[in-house]
């Protein structure tokens, strides 16, 4: 696949026709090249991309919804036999089954959704009720809240039963208790429930602090998952729900905690949020899209002051366009400057992650932010 250097993209984007936004191009590349529907894999990164397609479905006119509905249906039918909820990263894709149950009324998607929910209830938990990120040992990771959130919110949309909102709130509170860094108000990546190191083949051995059992680093994308989970919950639940006020409070605290760390020049955030002066640190695009998505949703929901926060998301939209999109074959654009899949580690581990293009969470976060921003921009005109 031929590449044009990322820094040259700005000229292309500024001179290109705006009949289609960069969101359309990233979306198309994701569906055509990254993950064709019949090749869908039942996993968490793909689930994030799938969720972006649900967002696009929701944004389209009736005539244009079919493209996204057909993708979701094909992807879920292709993975129906292997679909499960045995750990959070597996639960993530199940929002597609619940979506289809809601849209089509087809019993097979409802049955699969209920089966996965029953499996989710059997995932090991920490003493405070937090669902373990790993099935083989009990560890709480910040990623988990979003992986569960996608499915639980769709189950709520399907049934109207607030037990699914209660599940999400329980998981947010349990993870918040164990992962919050008091100094920054942000979350560290992980917490280990015991004193036995578990080798998952990906994380750095010995990552938990011997006393607190927390990991040491405040990883950007991990915190990005948290913000998207909170904003999607607030957009979904009723305004008179008893869960709303506590979630609004958590949301405002979250935004106030991430906002000061935005790089003023690029609009991006750093891989390790609170270490911008570290010469090995780097600007990372997927977390940037996630933070900006969260802030944009807060603006749409009228929870944030537009004088303060609208310029921040303007800067992100422009910064991603100029710095973090690569041009692929033909007219495609795809996310660049994306830190690859990441387990739990020390400072050096995060600062030496492979920088990639695409990835499910890259496509998903870019599409969801870009779509939300363009909708918000339309509201401001």
Image (cartoon, rainbow, N blue to C red):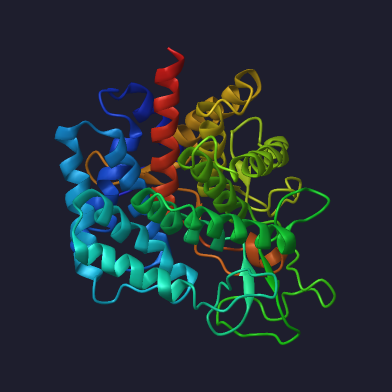
In this picture, residue 4 sits left or right of residue 271 = left
User: In which quadrant of the rendered view does residue 112 lie?
Assistant: bottom left
Residue 221 lies, in percent from the top left, at 57, 53
Q: Which of 245 and 86 is in front in this view?
A: 245
Vertical order, 243 against 340 (above or below): above
Q: Quadrant of the C terminus?
A: top left
Q: In which quarter of the image is the N terminus?
A: bottom left
Q: Which of 157 and 45 is in front in this view?
A: 157
| Whether residue 1 can be seen here | no
Q: Which of 96 and 328 is in front in this view?
A: 96
Q: Which residue is drawn at 57% across and 49% down?
A: 224
In this picture, residue 336 sits left or right of residue 65 = right
Q: Which residue is drawn at 67% across and 37% down?
A: 252
Q: Which of 330 and 157 is in front in this view?
A: 157
Residue 246 lies, in percent from the top left, at 66, 44
| Whether residue 255 can be seen here | yes
């Amino acid at each position: 696949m031929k590449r044009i250097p990322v820094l040259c993209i700005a000229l292309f984007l500024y001179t290109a026709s705006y009949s289609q936004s960069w969101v359309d191009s990233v979306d198309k590349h994701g569906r055509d090249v990254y993950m064709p529907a019949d090749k869908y894999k039942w996993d968490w990164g793909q689930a994030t991309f799938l969720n972006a397609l649900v967002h696009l479905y929701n944004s389209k006119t009736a005539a244009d919804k079919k493209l996204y509905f057909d993708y979701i249906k094909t992807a879920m039918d292709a993975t129906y036999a292997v679909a499960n909820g045995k750990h959070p990263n597996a639960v993530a894709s199940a929002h597609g089954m619940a979506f289809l149950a809601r849209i089509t009324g087809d019993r097979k998607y409802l049955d699969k959704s209920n089966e996965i929910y029953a499996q989710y209830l059997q995932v090991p938990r920490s003493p405070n009720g937090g669902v373990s990120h790993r099935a083989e040992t009990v560890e709480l990771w910040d990623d988990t809240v979003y992986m569960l959130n996608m499915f639980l919110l769709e189950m709520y949309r399907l049934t109207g039963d607030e037990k699914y909102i209660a599940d999400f709130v329980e998981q947010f509170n349990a993870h918040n208790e164990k992962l919050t860094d008091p100094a920054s108000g942000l979350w560290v990546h992980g917490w280990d429930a015991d004193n036995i190191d578990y080798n998952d083949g990906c994380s750095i051995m010995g990552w938990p602090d011997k006393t607190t059992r927390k990991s040491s680093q405040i990883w950007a994308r991990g915190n990005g998952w948290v913000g998207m989970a909170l904003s999607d919950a607030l957009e979904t639940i009723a305004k008179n729900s008893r869960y709303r006020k506590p979630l609004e409070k958590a949301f405002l605290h979250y935004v106030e905690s991430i906002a000061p760390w935005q790089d003023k020049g690029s609009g991006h955030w750093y891989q390790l949020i609170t270490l911008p002066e570290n010469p090995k640190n780097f600007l990372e695009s997927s977390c940037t899209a996630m933070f900006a998505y969260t802030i944009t949703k807060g603006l749409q929901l009228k929870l944030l002051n537009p004088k303060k926060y609208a310029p921040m998301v303007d800067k992100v939209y422009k910064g991603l366009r100029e710095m973090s999109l690569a041009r692929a074959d033909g007219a495609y654009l795809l996310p660049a400057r994306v830190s690859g899949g990441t387990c739990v580690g020390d400072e050096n581990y995060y600062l030496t992650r492979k920088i990639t293009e695409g990835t499910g969470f890259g496509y998903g976060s870019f599409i969801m932010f870009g779509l939300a921003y363009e909708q918000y921009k339309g509201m401001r005109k």
